[in-house]
Image (cartoon, coloured by chain):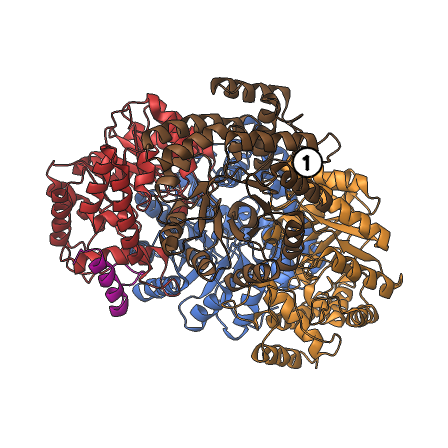
Chain colours: A blue, B orange, C brown, D red
Amino acid sequence: MSPREPRFSGVVPPLVTPLTSDGEVDAPSLERLVEFLVEAGVTGLFALGSSGEAAFLTDARRDRALEVVVRAAAGRVPVLAGCIETTTARVIERAEVAAKLGADATVVTAPFYTRIHPLEIDRHFRAVRAAVDLPMFAYDVPVSVHTKLAVDQVLALAADGVIDGLKDSSGDDVGFRQVVLGAAGLPGFSALTGHEVVVDAMMLAGADGAVPGLGNVDPHGYVRLIRACAEGRWADAKAEQDRLTRLFRIVDAASPETAGGSTRGIGAFKTALALRGVIASGAVSPPMRELTADETRTVASHLDEAGLL
Amino acid sequence: MSPREPRFSGVVPPLVTPLTSDGEVDAPSLERLVEFLVEAGVTGLFALGSSGEAAFLTDARRDRALEVVVRAAAGRVPVLAGCIETTTARVIERAEVAAKLGADATVVTAPFYTRIHPLEIDRHFRAVRAAVDLPMFAYDVPVSVHTKLAVDQVLALAADGVIDGLKDSSGDDVGFRQVVLGAAGLPGFSALTGHEVVVDAMMLAGADGAVPGLGNVDPHGYVRLIRACAEGRWADAKAEQDRLTRLFRIVDAASPETAGGSTRGIGAFKTALALRGVIASGAVSPPMRELTADETRTVASHLDEAGLL
Amino acid sequence: MSPREPRFSGVVPPLVTPLTSDGEVDAPSLERLVEFLVEAGVTGLFALGSSGEAAFLTDARRDRALEVVVRAAAGRVPVLAGCIETTTARVIERAEVAAKLGADATVVTAPFYTRIHPLEIDRHFRAVRAAVDLPMFAYDVPVSVHTKLAVDQVLALAADGVIDGLKDSSGDDVGFRQVVLGAAGLPGFSALTGHEVVVDAMMLAGADGAVPGLGNVDPHGYVRLIRACAEGRWADAKAEQDRLTRLFRIVDAASPETAGGSTRGIGAFKTALALRGVIASGAVSPPMRELTADETRTVASHLDEAGLL
Amino acid sequence: MSPREPRFSGVVPPLVTPLTSDGEVDAPSLERLVEFLVEAGVTGLFALGSSGEAAFLTDARRDRALEVVVRAAAGRVPVLAGCIETTTARVIERAEVAAKLGADATVVTAPFYTRIHPLEIDRHFRAVRAAVDLPMFAYDVPVSVHTKLAVDQVLALAADGVIDGLKDSSGDDVGFRQVVLGAAGLPGFSALTGHEVVVDAMMLAGADGAVPGLGNVDPHGYVRLIRACAEGRWADAKAEQDRLTRLFRIVDAASPETAGGSTRGIGAFKTALALRGVIASGAVSPPMRELTADETRTVASHLDEAGLL
């Protein structure tokens, strides 16, 4: 729909990071995951995002995961690297590593833990981009960083060439729409939605693509969905999205009475991938917990219903 | 798109309440507004919502406004009446008045001001519905009541016939999608989005209609938009929505440094309607303030750009 | 400790409103409660606050409760009347009733339900005070109104004679301390803390008194506590406060898994008063629920431990 | 006041980390700060807390700062080391470094960035303590981590010997009081308040000491304050606290319209220390900014008024 020619578009799943039982990166599983996604037709890979347990991995494990993804992608699709750190100097360190390991872009949030001012958020993005010469996505994820990027702030950073795109996980579709409209004159800008159950709607609204956590589990579905959107087959897109929305209920397999949101989402994605034979296990980083046998059965039944087992 | 036959659908604007300079309901202006909207083809009228300044009007003024709207609508379209009160007994009083004055449905939020439990929210809706025999919408508006209705809670109330629809102003499109999917087997249920800049997207996602505050100002645009959606002309729908999204910038005419969100929205809608000659003035209830001359010029220039002056 | 001569000071309990089984004001119980408190030595009565279920009572029931309290107090101590409403015009209506029924002061919060700006909050307090000639307390209760009054805002309103005191239920003791310091030159200003478990600490910090919900249940304890503070017997004050803090665990009798915060607090206070024979029953307004038999036993055991049965 | 014999008590300032103009740790300034504090009579030093810019420093700079503090303290007072990281494995890495560099205790928050469950918070603290054999403080700082530690959770961790103390920066004095009461039977447990303007009040409530950011600037004042509390001279304590509360207005020198809360606090403390000749400059980490000349003059005038220049 867009007159723009965004540099990044389509389906860019935020890869989970498969782990061994002692918490190390399970490289063979991660390689299989990359292969699974690339063969399904995704147009990019986002490593070390929230779904990739970036906040749970030591620096050494983060490096290892990114290294494996870049090598396995082998230039077939671009690799975006999350540089999830509290403030500027720490993010720059991660962005330098991302550049060295061969990532094609960085993904950077507003500062967190600290009490921050919009002017400081602006300086933050500018300083990171000035320090590391890679395309950069602003990652708007208030549920994690507890600050919302303002529409005008995103557009100003985009107009100045500081950011090359937005990964929107804010749940604020009003703001997302306004960013998309405001970026109409910025040809290379990429507006990607992070909400896996409204991809059809956001594509109609002008998104360039999606970063769906559930895309780890059913990349073929998201590739079909985005294709239907691109071809203006909106009823087909909606039908595919409705199927995926039902599948998304795997994140309710673990009870909110015993598991936090990160456990419920990441645990479900990993469990589903293990059930589908892509990765070796559903192991997650402490203090999260792996899904129980009962919860795993629930995931399996949703996969079965979706025709994915 | 929906296999359901919702009782309420299409464009149901949340009417502003025109006021005289001493804060009374400006009945002639309100009658003109009703006429303006009905002639434009809206399919319902929502009186005494947040945009209608329900929280600012004394009971006597609320009664007067509803009376005027019901009489002016004259049965051509149904009238939904907001019953915005802190807790159960107070809401029931308002719902009884709504029934007496001839409203076709009530619109009820979760309790507010108090510290509430989901079980108590459930009891609240059931008690109101049991007390007053009118169709009832649950109004999910966490920005005002500071509680979010859960998907399962909405679906349980719908399945039990307690609520006949949802007016969703939560900004949580993920949850809205899940309600729409979950309500597939509830024929009469109406899922209406309250977010005026993503109506195309939410209609694609399965909404039955919209309750757009901006629909006061440009009802013709929303009627065209909904019609395009109904006929599967999604590119047309998107183009209309994009135009309306640009028009929505009138709510930024008043500065956030001197005006709260309610002033900025309601003040802009009223100012635009005054500029369009529908109502007599942009007067709002204290402690809100009317838009300044400068701010009014900004609104006028947006109207002009949208071809509405 | 204070060089000021505040107009209101000491122990000013926020009265619960005893109810009959059909939700009406139980006047005989309310009269007994007033007598119980006045005989214990409290220096004021706060009717129709959050603990008084102001948000749950219809206007008729609010009027009735205030009428009973004023008559029962019979001028022995001043009566403060909560005027808890969403915005200015509605608050003024309640303040006019309070004046007519003989209250000695009003207690007014920032607007709620609406999205408000600090300048609008300022106009709100000024408009209410201009409309009704009674001393007025600003009631800072962000847990209910979701806005925090700023220190400078409170001090400006106080300096201009708009407010005569602050009832602080914000939990922000840093801000409270700054208000107390800033009000040093305002002789009649009253700074009252609403947090029943830190009264000793806040009195040391310069508070003029307390509005303790738990003061319904054990007014004698709070009277002793405040007297110890006034006489500089801080170790005695702390010992009394520690006893009352343990007693405050009655609010944990009802489980947070089945009851909201309002139910847990108000339900516990009423149940304790019924167990002590002051009021007839622990009935609360819907959608709250009365405490169960088990929960009542928990309350009884805490009362017993505190020597109150 | 306490029957307990807490292992850590008194005044434990959270040290700022002086920086050179290129962002490195200014070791000579940091050594002078340690000397200034120890000579003033503080009973402990908390390095790498929020005031220490832990969230802004790279790992190398964190290590350097801790190394300097431990060496300069030279065993005269214990050194607590903040281990501020998103989740378990990353915290353990920091705690191992702290142990290696000679810290006497760790200070650990709940996980942040992730969406966490109370059970996961519990596992987090237990895993960190199991991995590193140092006394551990739970650091309750919801303004940064956006989770509040529950009273029962803190007491359970304390009873099991997982944590040796609480550094409370939650602003929830009600909860703090309940922790203090609940910990009465845990002899070694230390309850320290992080709120510099209510230290007298919290000491009366049973705190064992304070971690005042402002204690960097006026350690002598806090030492006098704590001594007055310990000796039961509460009126003296209050007078000293009132003086310090006035001094605390230095954090308002930078405007909230151009600076975030971290800049305003840390920037003011550093500027004051530079003005007092203790450290070389007021430099802070990006994206924070140093105080302007005007703002510095404001700080200076407050210092002057407090007799500190």
Residue at 23% in and 28% down: D7
* Pick the front one: C195 or D130: C195
Left or right of A122? Residue D82 is left
Classify the position of the N terminus of chain C by image quarter: top left
Q: Is residue D308 magenta?
A: yes
- Highlighted magenta segment, given as a residue range: D284-309
* Pick the front one: D265 or A218: D265
Residue A276 percent location from the top left of the image: 55, 37
Residue C231 vertical placement versus A129 (above, below): above
Residue at 61% in and 39% down: C74
Residue D97 in sight from this viewpoint: no
Residue B63 percent location from the top left of the image: 78, 57
Q: Chain of mark 1?
A: C
Residue C147 vertical placement versus D208 (above, below): below
Q: Residue furthest right?
A: B75
Q: Name which quarter of the figure residue C23 lies in.
A: top right
Residue D300 in sight from this viewpoint: yes
- Judged from the image, the secondary structure of the residue bearing numbered disc 1 is loop
Residue D30 percent location from the top left of the image: 15, 51
Q: Is residue D252 magenta?
A: no
Residue at 77% in and 72% down: B29
Left or right of C251? Residue D67 is left
Label 1 sits on what residue type? Answer: Ser
The number of numbered badges drawn on the structure is: 1
Residue at 37% in and 35% down: C229
Residue B228 vertical placement versus D37 (above, below): below
Residue D138 percent location from the top left of the image: 34, 35
Left or right of C203? Residue C167 is right
Residue B15 vertical placement versus A186 (above, below): above
Query: On the image, numbered disc 1 is attached to which residue?
Result: C285
